[in-house]
């Protein structure tokens, strides 16, 4: 992230705006506001970079956008952004922003896995996400009370962070428990849990891999009866079956059901599969992407508009857990809250040296699968499966580029396509007059090189402006994380 921010940026107050993306100024009279000018506007929808652009922000919305000299009424304030590049606010489609560290304890003689929410950690997560230009996240599961508290604090300004669209307690059998998990046992309980989460402001109902097909069906129906979208992280149940049951979204590029393998490969997979982590890459070794089962799956997902959160970094991190510095260098670890980092490192799967070698060899096939999803018209959400944004976000976009997805398409996945997939494309994710003032300025052009997304110089969210230093300073970031880089 760039630190040599110009004097004009340092002087910014807390009032600002976002950009909309027309190439000429509107001619009607607009109210005075804050004018940002002189920057290059990166427009993924029109697939163009517009130089010498300006945007006028008023009352948290985009009032005008254009190029050249501003001809309207004198703004309240004018900020010269020459040399900077602008995108709509970025969207992390899989960010556990309210999650603290995983923990395991023994309760009444039985193990209990829980993910408690801790307000101080949530505050840290939110600041890091926003400092990296993430203005919206979808949080796919967590304590609904903590999620509701997050939303309230964002609304009042008590917390600096992105807007969040949440799933509440994840539906999963024991040994998972605590406030971040629930396990209904009857239709009445399913309905009650979905209703509880909806009443607390949740948007999604998260169904997990320990459920059987009947439970998955009950969960989908309970979600829809209560106005929630049903999303799922699946394992033994195939994505095709889930789509036909009515699932709205699927999490991770891990379609590890044997039902998606052709008969011979299926028999091999089932005979080999044990309790270890080998299945996370073995499925890709055996899968026939051109075979009828996966081709059928792609058609069904596209037709039913099932949104897939690809989280390719999960595969990369798992396959390289024996050499973490190659995918999670010390300077990137500094952006984790120390407690969450410690939990992450302890929960990474352990594999033999030979299995790690095979897993890394399977990564190109993982990327090819993501490319095929996109090419088939399956809606994709870019997500980190972290606590929101951070350095992992630019790496996630780099993986999608490596998969063979076009650079402009990748930027749309991070902005307008994500907003559409989340049902908020009418108010954010695009550069247009009347949209919410969510925008990020960068020190270099991120097109074709997502590493540029780390060079954030200014973030606007609903018109409020802050530099990364100002945002991270709100949680005393430097003193909390300085020791991590030295580990």
Image (spheres, rainbow, N blue to C red):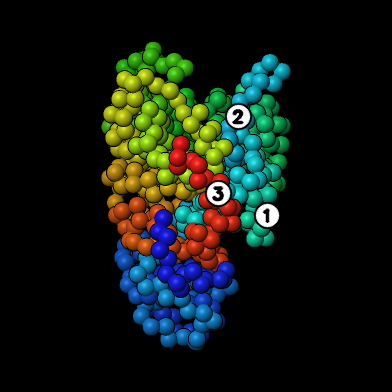
Q: Is residue 466 visible?
A: yes
Circle 1 residues within 10 Å: few <14, some 14–19, many ≥20 = few
Residue depicted at x 48% and y 79%: 78
| Foreground of the two, 202 or 338 | 338
Residue 152: mark: 1
Q: Dividing the picture into quarters, in which one does residue 321 lie?
A: top left
| SS under mark 1 | helix
Circle 2 residues within 10 Å: few <14, some 14–19, many ≥20 = few
Task: Say if 154 sits above or below 371 in the image.
Answer: below
Distance (Cα) linking label 3 and label 2: 25 Å
Distance (Cα) linking label 3 and label 1: 27 Å
Residue 103: mark: 2
* Image x and y of residue 319, in percent: 37, 30
Q: Earlier in the sequence, mark 3 or mark 2?
A: 2
| SS under mark 2 | strand
Residue 479: mark: 3
Image-based side of 29 in relation to 6, left or right:
right
Residue depicted at x 51% and y 37%: 341
Residue depicted at x 66% and y 58%: 158
| Foreground of the two, 223 or 416 | 416
| Foreground of the two, 41 or 432 | 41
């Amino acid at each position: 992230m760039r630190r040599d921010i110009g004097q004009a940026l340092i002087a910014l107050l807390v009032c600002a705006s976002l950009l909309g993306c027309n190439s000429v100024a509107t001619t009607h009279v607009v109210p005075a506001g804050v004018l940002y000018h002189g920057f290059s506007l990166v427009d993924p929808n029109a697939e163009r970079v517009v130089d010498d652009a300006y945007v006028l922000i008023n009352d948290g919305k985009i009032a005008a956008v254009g190029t050249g000299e501003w001809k309207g009424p004198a703004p309240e304030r004018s900020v010269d952004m020459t040399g900077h590049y602008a995108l709509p606010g970025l969207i992390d489609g899989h960010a556990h922003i309210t999650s603290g560290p995983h923990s395991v304890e023994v309760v009444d003689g039985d193990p209990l896995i829980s993910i408690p929410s801790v307000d101080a950690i949530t505050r840290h997560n939110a600041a890091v996400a926003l400092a990296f230009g993430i203005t919206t996240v979808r949080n796919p599961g967590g304590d609904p009370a903590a999620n509701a508290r997050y939303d309230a604090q964002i609304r009042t300004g008590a917390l600096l962070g992105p807007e969040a669209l949440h799933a509440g307690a994840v539906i999963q059998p024991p040994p998972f428990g605590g406030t971040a998990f629930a396990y209904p046992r009857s239709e009445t309980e399913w309905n009650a849990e979905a209703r509880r989460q909806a009443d607390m402001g949740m948007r999604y109902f998260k169904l997990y891999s320990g459920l059987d097909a009947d439970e998955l069906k009950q969960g989908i129906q309970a979600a829809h009866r209560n106005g929630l979208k049903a999303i799922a992280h699946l394992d033994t149940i195939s994505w095709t079956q889930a789509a036909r049951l009515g699932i709205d979204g699927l999490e991770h590029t891990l379609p590890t059901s044997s039902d998606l393998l052709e008969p011979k490969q299926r028999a091999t997979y089932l005979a080999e599969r044990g309790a270890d982590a080998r299945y996370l890459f073995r499925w890709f070794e055996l899968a026939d992407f051109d075979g009828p089962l996966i081709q059928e799956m792609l058609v069904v997902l596209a037709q039913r508009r099932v949104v897939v959160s690809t989280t390719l970094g999960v595969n990369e991190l798992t396959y390289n857990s024996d050499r973490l510095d190659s995918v999670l260098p010390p300077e990137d670890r500094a952006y984790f809250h120390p407690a969450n980092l410690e939990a992450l490192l302890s929960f990474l799967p352990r594999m033999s040296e030979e299995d790690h070698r095979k897993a890394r060899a399977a990564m190109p096939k993982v990327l090819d699968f993501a490319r095929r999803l996109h090419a088939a018209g399956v809606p994709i959400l870019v997500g980190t499966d972290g606590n929101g944004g951070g350095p992992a976000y630019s790496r996630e976009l780099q993986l999608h580029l490596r998969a063979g997805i076009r650079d402009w398409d990748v930027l749309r996945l991070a902005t307008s396509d994500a907003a559409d997939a989340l049902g908020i494309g009418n108010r954010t994710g695009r550069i247009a007059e009347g949209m919410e003032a969510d925008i990020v300025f960068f020190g270099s052009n991120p097109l074709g090189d997502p590493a540029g997304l780390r060079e954030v110089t200014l973030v606007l969210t609903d018109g409020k402006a802050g530099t990364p230093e100002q945002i991270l300073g709100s949680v005393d970031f430097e003193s909390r994380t300085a020791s991590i880089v030295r580990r």
